[in-house]
């Protein structure tokens, strides 16, 4: 078996140090001048830093260890060591390192906190991902298309950059899912049935075009109930004002379900067999099995629990933000239409995705299966890959997701909450926390029929401004190659790779123990990997401590001689800061015969979203470099394999414009 931890081999020069002569690492037509690239980047960095200084960016300002400096405010000392969420009956909402360690970690609360400068924190705000103007955000809620506008509601704390027990619904609208206009808060926690939080919910568009919104309220006794709201003015395409039903709540927890284990209703679908609408709500039983409960209604006021449990999986815990929707073919399918098709012609080859957000580990799991409306049962295609134990939407930072059907483009669109992995101290200093993922289309992978395909909505391509086609580049094992780019902090990168087949054939030894999270990351060397891209690299440094985030493949040969491909992110060298979470994440990705290894990587300041093999596997990372920012950031190809050359058979890098979201005042002036 190949050794990846050094073993008898010399210490790995990659990815944490660079070859002395980058050109010597390249075979074929592609050659660039490394010193010239460094000089250009250094000059650009000097200009940018000078401009920042003139603009009033205080590069010398740093956060004190004992508190947070807010712009224009005195030093504030806050208790940021406690857990947030579980005591209120929801998943952990604590940001960063402390959340990974049960809410208590001295590095986030004591004198060892990293001294973030204003320039570092300002750089972290993204250019084309959705985020509110300020304060805390978590789950996406009620996404819907209405009278020419896409609407996104979201869990929002109007009072600060950390989660609290007065969560409201933020609201924004867009005509292209990218350029957003921020609107006033849609719903505040102002009634006894939601006074402790207007929590997650879903929109349903009725046949007459009207909208109803179901959401979970946390009552004055912290009981989770389901509530109804509707637009105050249905003629308003922006849906600015909302009215809560005077008879709320419309649903209480059923017998044998915990008062804090009953939340997040789905979008409703219509079943013509009895003329009633159905929704699903996530829960768990007293044996810690996650489960999906079905309710039916004619008017969204009076609900009836459908007998039996739609689906249950032992030892998976509370199922939050549950979703159920049909897939089949290249387009999205509306759930009501899919149910009608079953009644009319058997439904064809349509499958149903069941997804749950696991309260136990805060990951989004899904499975493919078949839904029988008559028996109220959903059955997985593969019991070994059931909900909560098999596939995930994303192998990185991605949670509490929600899909909606877009009737204008016949597609299903997925949103996911991408939380922070820094410290709450830093979040309060910058005044905001959390992003939404790039909206993704979701379809069935018709080649494997065993997984979904996720891909950035096509509108993302309208933000491409300057494209560089770098053609074919071959990189020897143990080498890196710098890419000559103008800017490297907002990018859309498309790349395909092939290992040298002679080298692959010469690799006979089995390599069966590889795992993205436990095998040394991008520094863990094997015969056929890792190789891929280094993004947000400090282009000024050529030593072993340069900041960098690795996006890579690792190919391992099995005992039977077959090849198994892993797709991973290595965040371990993404930042010099010590008060952030830095992990290696990823999983095996299916690669069919004859397919090249392909990736698409979206880099947007503090988020890196990657899609492998056309979207069969996705990984999202939050990264917080302290030096690889502004003009200092670079991108490299790397090949840290010990025994194979790799060729980037195609490599196109698109620089990305910002989406320039508008606030309410700017919108009113149009």
Image: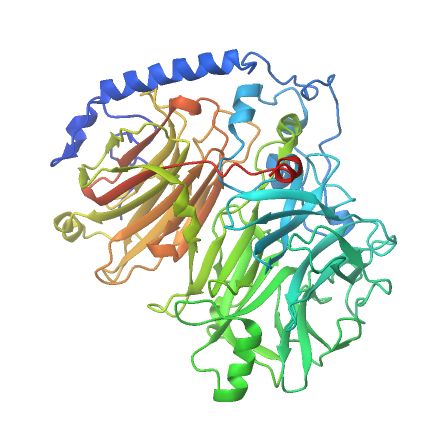
Q: Percent position (x, y) of residue 181?
A: 60, 43
What residue lies at 39% left-to-right and 67% top-to-bottom?
Answer: 330
Q: Percent position (x, y) of residue 100?
A: 60, 41
**Count of all numbered marks drawn on residues in the image:** 0
Q: Is residue 548 visible?
A: yes
Choose between 280 and 188: the one closer to the eye.
188
In the displayed structure, would residue 22 be above or below residue 182? above
Q: Percent position (x, y) of residue 285?
A: 71, 67
In the displayed structure, would residue 474 be above or below residue 414? above
Q: Viewed as shown, does residue 180 lie left or right of 257?
A: left
In the displayed structure, would residue 139 be above or below residue 305? above
Choose between 177 and 379: the one closer to the eye.
177
Give the colour scheme of this rendering: rainbow
Q: Percent position (x, y) of residue 326?
A: 51, 71
Q: Is residue 289 visible?
A: no
Q: Residue furthest front?
A: 670
């Amino acid at each position: 078996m190949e050794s990846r931890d050094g073993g008898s081999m010399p210490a790995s020069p990659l990815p944490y140090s660079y070859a002395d002569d980058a050109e010597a690492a390249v075979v074929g037509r592609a050659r660039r001048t490394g010193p010239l690239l460094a000089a250009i980047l250094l000059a650009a960095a000097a200009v940018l830093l000078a401009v920042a200084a003139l603009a009033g960016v205080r590069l010398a300002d740093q956060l004190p260890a004992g508190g947070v400096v807010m712009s224009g405010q005195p030093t504030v000392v806050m208790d940021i060591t406690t857990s947030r969420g579980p005591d209120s009956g929801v998943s952990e909402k604590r940001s960063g390192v402390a959340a990974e360690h049960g809410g208590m970690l001295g590095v986030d609360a004591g004198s060892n906190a990293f001294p973030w400068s204003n320039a570092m924190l300002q750089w972290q705000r993204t250019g084309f991902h959705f985020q509110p103007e300020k304060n805390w955000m978590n789950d996406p809620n009620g996404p819907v298309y209405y009278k020419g506008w896409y609407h996104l509601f979201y869990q929002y704390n109007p009072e600060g950059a950390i989660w609290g027990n007065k969560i409201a619904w933020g609201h924004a609208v867009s005509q292209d899912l990218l350029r957003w206009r921020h609107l006033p808060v849609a719903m505040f926690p102002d009634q006894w049935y939601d006074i402790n939080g207007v929590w997650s919910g879903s929109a349903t568009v009725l046949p007459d075009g009207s909208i109803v919104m179901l959401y979970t309220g946390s009552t004055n006794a912290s009981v989770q109930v389901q509530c109804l709201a509707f637009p105050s003015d249905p003629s308003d395409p922006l849906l600015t004002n909302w009215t809560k039903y005077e008879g709320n709540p419309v649903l209480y927890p059923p017998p044998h379900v915990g008062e804090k284990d009953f939340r997040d209703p789905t979008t409703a679908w219509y079943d013509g067999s009895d003329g009633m609408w159905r929704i699903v709500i996530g829960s768990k039983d007293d044996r810690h099995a996650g489960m999906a409960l079905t309710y039916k209604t004619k008017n969204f006021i009076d609900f009836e629990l459908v007998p039996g449990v739609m689906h249950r999986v032992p030892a998976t815990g509370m199922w939050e933000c549950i979703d159920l929707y049909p897939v089949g073919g290249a387009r999205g399918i509306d759930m009501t239409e899919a149910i009608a098709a079953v009644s009319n012609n058997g439904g064809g080859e349509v499958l149903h995705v069941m997804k749950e957000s696991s309260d136990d580990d805060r990951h989004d799991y899904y499975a493919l299966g078949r839904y029988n409306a008559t028996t109220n049962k959903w059955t997985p295609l593969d019991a070994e890959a059931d909900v909560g134990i098999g596939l995930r939407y994303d192998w990185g930072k991605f949670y509490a997701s929600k899909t909606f059907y877009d009737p204008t483009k016949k597609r299903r669109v997925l949103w996911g909450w991408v939380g922070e992995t820094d410290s709450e101290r830093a979040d309060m200093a910058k005044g905001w926390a959390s992003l939404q993922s790039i909206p993704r289309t979701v379809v069935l992978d018709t080649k494997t029929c065993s997984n979904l395909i996720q891909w950035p909505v096509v509108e993302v391509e309208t933000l491409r401004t300057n494209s560089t086609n770098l053609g074919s580049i071959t990189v020897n094992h143990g080498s890196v190659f710098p890419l000559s780019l103008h800017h490297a902090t907002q990018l859309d990168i498309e790349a395909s790779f092939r290992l040298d087949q002679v080298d692959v054939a010469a690799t006979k030894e089995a390599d069966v123990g590889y795992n993205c999270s436990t095998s040394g990351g991008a520094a863990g060397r094997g015969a056929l990997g890792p190789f891929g891209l280094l993004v947000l690299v400090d282009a000024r440094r050529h030593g072993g401590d340069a900041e960098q985030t690795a996006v890579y493949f690792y190919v391992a040969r099995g005992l039977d001689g077959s090849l198994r491909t892993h797709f991973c992110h290595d965040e371990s060298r993404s930042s010099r800061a010590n008060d952030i979470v830095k992990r290696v994440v990823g999983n095996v990705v299916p690669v069919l015969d004859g397919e090249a290894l392909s990736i698409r990587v979206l880099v947007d300041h503090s988020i890196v979203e990657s899609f492998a093999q056309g979207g069969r596997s996705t990984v999202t990372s939050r990264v917080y470099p302290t030096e690889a920012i502004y003009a200092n950031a670079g991108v490299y190809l790397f090949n840290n394999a010990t025994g194979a050359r790799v060729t980037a058979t195609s490599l196109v890098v698109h620089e990305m414009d910002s989406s320039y979201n508008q606030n309410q005042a700017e919108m009113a002036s149009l």
